[in-house]
Image: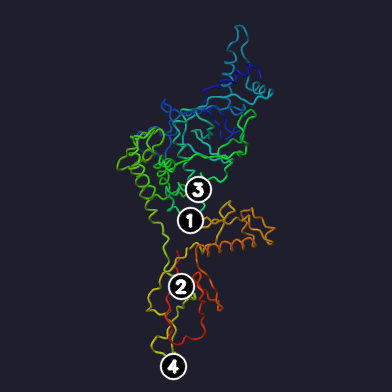
Amino acid sequence: MTTHTLELLKEPYGYFDEDCLAFGGTIPRRLELTQVNMVHDGEAIGLDSTEWLLPPGAPHNPAQRCMNNNVRVWGLFEVKKVEWLSEKGQQRLQSLMRKRDNQGRQPGIARSILTLDSFYATLRREGYDEKVKILLSFVKNMNARSEEDNAGVRTLCIHSVENRAYIIKNMDVAFFNLSINWHYRYQLFYLMKKLVRDAKVQQPIEVRTIHWFVKEYNLQVRNQTDEHQRLIFSTQRDDDDPDPTPLTGDVPHRRYLRHIASADIRGRFADQCEWLLANQIASASSAVQLFDTKAWVKWCKEVQKLREETRDQLPRPWGVARNTRLEDLQFSEEDPFGLERFGGKAKEWADKLKNALNRAAAKPKNVQPQSAIPFSVPVKKASKRKRKQRATQFIYDDDFSDSSTDSYFSDSEDDAELSRKINLLHFQRPSLPHDNLNWHCTYSECYFTVDMREITTSKTHDCRRDHPQVLSCPAIYEIFMEKVNTHLLDKHLDLDIHIASDKSVYLLRRGETRPPRESSGPRRGARERKPRIKAELD
């Protein structure tokens, strides 16, 4: 590559509007931009000021001043192929390159006749990967989006009024500082979704409070079992990079993670607690329902009190996000959480919050069933037909001091004493989580686990134990159910199940040696009244 050619590639050319780009052809559907900046009315702004959850409807609110389509984005775009430019764009870029090529030429020397095709042919011939860069400008017309690519990496995507999508590879320093809250909000949102999805014990939304999320963060993120695996490392490295860490992230020495107080973790949630609340109530979609709304409202009120208590704390009070002053977090009675700064109107947010709380209150609760399973008593289905007794039919009883009717079936008998509750989880078929070969006990305080890869017998040597559909193998499923049932009976149910010779099912308390009484012919005489004990479904 000659010095003259390098000079032509050194600085970007511009400015170019979107009409300089080609439509269709070989140009990608998503274009990559670097060193991105954003301007509104001649003032540099960031995503913290332009993004909303509801369409802006309160022009008097200064937080909604930049929430419009009059936002211009600038960024560097690398033209890897000449065909990516329209005819207008090719002519303008060629003119600018010739102008730069003529700089420094002595008078009387012929003017430049450089063409884009000849210049790109020179780049290919000399094996140079770098291409011409232009400074591209466009008007943003919708909210920025955080998307996940094929490699699982989240990227920032911005759309223009010309219906083009741009992937933001990196930002100008000023633009990033003015967009840091936007990044923190969506990082926290997707972290919470991950904590819910990967929780060892799946809990309903009513249980997911701030305490639950802090606990799951400690279990899933901080509680790393591999002491030699780095959490942050590069999978690509130059030959002259002095970093000795292998590309796999494994290090020979033991890692010692710094201590993180629970208050720091709670503080990260507190910084964005109102935005998380607004994001959940803005839509009734299940994709954004992460926590119990009523409990989160209570948590937001607690954060507001703690902000005032730490007013003099440096560098900023606890629970106050970046680029935010405590004075900006003083809200009115009609908008107690300042949700209007995320778009919409205060009345609109109040209605959405009320509807969200009503939906949560209207959800059916896990009520206790009325019927119960008694201990030591056959479980038989009672007939609804009334038995008609003929006048000539008698039941002989040689002792008329007690009724000849069985005391258990007496209608006048008092209710049985409730001895134990049986969790409904015992009546559900156990299954494996998605993409996980470990079955975890469904009780929140129990850490019993069945590893499907460790189930080996002579009947399972041909079965794949590393496949998600491992339970479809009858031999493995039989052993799996035996392990699960044994654990539940021994640790949680505390019952023995007996089947009598007449196929009746009996539940005996653990350690009870008295065998179940089986029926043998018609009942005669008085029977000793035995205490009734029953178990109730939980």
Outermost residue, top side: 108
Q: Distance from label 1 to label 3 (Cα)?
A: 13 Å
Name which of mark 1 and mark 3 comes first in the sequence. Answer: 3
Nearer the observer: mark 2 or 3; the answer is 3
Q: Is residue 377 left or right of residue 458?
A: left
Q: Position of residue 147 (x, y in %)?
A: 52, 40
Q: Secondary structure at mark 1?
A: loop
Name which of mark 4 and mark 3 comes first in the sequence. Answer: 3
In the rendered image, the vertical position of residue 409 relative to residue 59, given as above or below: below
Q: In the rendered picture of this protein, how many numbered marks are placed on residues?
A: 4
Q: Amino acid at mark 3?
A: Leu
Q: Which mark is residue 464?
A: none
Q: Amino acid at mark 2?
A: Pro
Q: Amino acid at mark 1?
A: Glu
Q: Position of residue 195 (x, y in %)?
A: 49, 47
Q: Secondary structure at mark 4?
A: loop
Q: Which mark is residue 219?
A: 3
- Near mark 3 (Cα within 10 A), the count class, few <14, some 14-19 or many ≥20, is some
Outermost residue, bottom side: 392
Pick the residue in front: 62 or 245.
245
Residue 374 in sight from this viewpoint: yes
Name which of mark 2 and mark 3 comes first in the sequence. Answer: 3
Q: Which mark is residue 374?
A: 2
Q: Distance from label 2 to label 4 (Cα)?
A: 35 Å
